[in-house]
Image (tube, coloured by chain):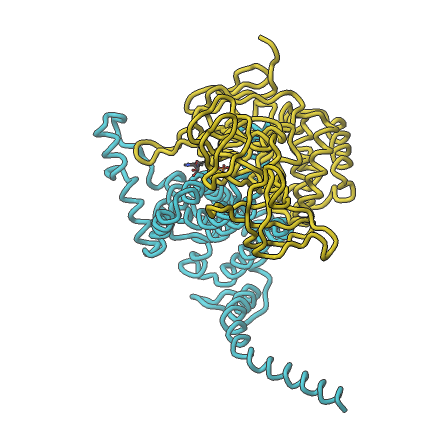
Chain colours: A cyan, B yellow
Amino acid sequence: MGIGTEEGRKKHQARSGWLLSLPALVLLLVGASGPLVIVAVYSFLKPGEYSGVQWIFSLEAWFKVLLEKDIFDGTISLADAHLAIFWRSAKLSLLTTAVTLVLGLPTAWFIATRPARSRALWLFLITIPFWTNLLIRTFAIMEVIRNEGILNTALLALGLIETPIQILYSGTAVLIGMTYVYLPLMVLPLFAAIDRFDFRLIEAGYDLYASRWQVLRRVILPIIRPGIVAGSILVFVPSLGAYVTPRVLGGGKNMMIGNFIELQFGQGRNWPLGASLSMVLLLIVVVALLIYVRTAPQEDRHD
Amino acid sequence: MGETFAVEARDAVKVYGTGVNAITALDHVSVTVSRGEFFTLLGPSGCGKTTLLRCIAGFETPTSGAILLSGQDITEEPPYRRPVNTVFQSYALFPHLTVARNIGFGLEMMGKPKAEIAETVARMLALVRLEEFAARLPQQLSGGQQQRVALARALAPKPQVLLLDEPLSALDLKLRKEMQGELKRLQLETGITFVFVTHDQEEALTMSDRIGVMRAGKLQQVGTPRDIYDRPANRYVADFIGETNFLTGVVEGGAVRLGSGDLVRAALGGQTGTVTLAVRPEQIRVVATNAPGAIPARITGKVYFGTDTHYHFALVDGTEVVARLQSRAQGEDDLPKGVEVGLQFEDSSVQVLGP
Ligand SMILES: Nc1ncnc2c1ncn2[C@@H]1O[C@H](COP(=O)(O)OP(=O)(O)OP(=O)(O)O)[C@@H](O)[C@H]1O
Ligand SMILES: [Mg+2]
């Protein structure tokens, strides 16, 4: 009786709850998982003659990601070129993460220690690049570092150099560009972490015989670690797939995964390979996120 | 030259800011604290107690003057090179370290061997009775427990001097009383010099060997709790420590004639003209109007405080006087409002403070 109706009501509530969340679920399925499923399916098909795919099951694309078959004698070897691209991308992403961290930490610290009013202004300045198109920002960087650009002109005028330094179309140029583009993503979570940091702990550290370096390493860094991890993930993940910046500033000489994937869908006319490469990229990102999730719970207890 | 003090401030001045915004937080403060002493800095908010403590800890450098530790000038030494530890008002425990690691932090930074650290930490945990909490994080502890961790952390490196900035102010009354006893016990057990800051006069009186009363950056009086209470150096100290009746009068022979016309005997020490007399409420006796030397007064009100009752009187010229009488069994000695009585001041209790 009473219990029965109670249960019935609960069931009804559960059902209507389901119905209410249905639009969101559909959107999630179609919007997020849908394209992913398509990419996953394409990676198991044969490439079409000019573009697109043929609906024939094939593991060729996955095979090609890491291995290659010699067309003459049929021996199988590691696809060095592909591995080099993955390695180059990973290296660039790690470097970008490291450089943005080294630059972002003092920047975030500076902002967090400003008075409340000017802090908002500094944060706004940091986020300004977000409001500009990535391509335009990248060309702006190009304008700064090219041989006749602002940097070289200034250095020449100051007499510090005699011939312009060739930065553009080099690894350095790409790193500079990536650092510029992703720095805000590092600064914001770092700022959030430092903003919550209790500065009195620094005095407690000094009081207990810790030197400046020890206070940084033993007190500040462990406490703001969630911010460091979050910022690193936020920079590492998108920079791994970045293709506009490496293409424009690297001059297409050093291909990154992003460019390579784009190539497969374009001139390469190998959609399945592009799809399987995308899946590998996703896998790397998932592993990176798993590392983050692993470290996060321990940190959360401190807040 | 004689005794070397555990801590000494020599003519310490601290000015914050410059120009029109300058605030003199310490105004030529000179004070000495002996080895093993429980010394308390007492004063209202903003009088410079924390500033003096921070100058001793090394977080601030005095604008002029010197800070000495065991006779050595440490004015320019950074905090991490001073054998002085602080118990912060906010505790400032490291949130990412367990209780045991918090307590061992100072020793770890000093580069002590692991075995020694573990041994000291265990001893400190026992000292503050937190053995079973060693593996917890600070935020898993109550306020009182956190306070004890802060204390243990500051004591672990065996500092020459322990600085405590209102360490009990965040605790509720009962816990506070408990911790007062605990602090005193720890100080006696360790023999470490304590410099304690509070704005609670009762806390200062019950715990200290000596008290320094501060006001607006200046040290008003330094002395034992008895000195400060019974022989306040000035009206400010008398008013700040406990309740006091202030009576103005003119010196007449060996006594003082009050505005009400009554004559009060006091140890004048050569003072003449107009003076202020300070009389503690508990040093006033209520007697019959015709008793010898009784000052006539009328009861204008009373407030019951449990163990004692505060009676408010008006002298014949209207001057208000408060007396604190022990509450007796009900009905007995219960003086109603409006009754005329006589007041007697114990001679030795009347302090002459100048005009
Ligand atoms: N960093 C600072 N900058 C400017 N003025 C300061 C600074 N620190 C303290 N002051 C000022 O110096 C004076 C003394 O401050 P201090 O903190 O020593 O007072 P306190 O006696 O500890 O007070 P409380 O009981 O409220 O803690 C105050 O007027 C305060 O406003
Ligand atoms: Mg203070």
Q: Is residue B13 left or right of residue A87?
A: left
Determine the residue positioned at 50% across, 65% down.
A47
Q: Residue furthest bottom?
A: A1
Q: Residue furthest top?
A: B1
Determine the residue positioned at 60% across, 34% down.
B164
In depth, the one of B187 and A7 nearer the eye is B187
Q: Is residue B231 above or below residue B296?
A: above
**Quarter in which the N terminus of chain A is drawn:** bottom right
Q: Is residue B172 above or below residue A219?
A: below
Query: Residue B125's image quarter?
Result: top right
Q: Is residue A108 left or right of residue B208?
A: left
**Whole-percent x, y for residue B178 in the image:** 71, 43
**Whole-percent x, y for residue A30 in the image:** 51, 74
**Whole-percent x, y for residue B111 in the image:** 66, 25
Q: Residue furthest left?
A: A157
Inspect this view and state whether residue A208 appears: no
Q: Is residue A225 above or below residue B158?
A: below
Q: Residue furthest front?
A: B290
In depth, the one of B308 and A79 nearer the eye is B308
Inspect this view and state whether residue B280 appears: yes
Badge count = 0
In depth, the one of B76 and B108 nearer the eye is B76
Q: Is residue B82 left or right of residue B132?
A: left
Determine the residue positioned at 44% across, 24% down.
B28
Determine the residue positioned at 49% across, 19% down.
B10
**Whole-percent x, y for residue A73 in the image:** 58, 49
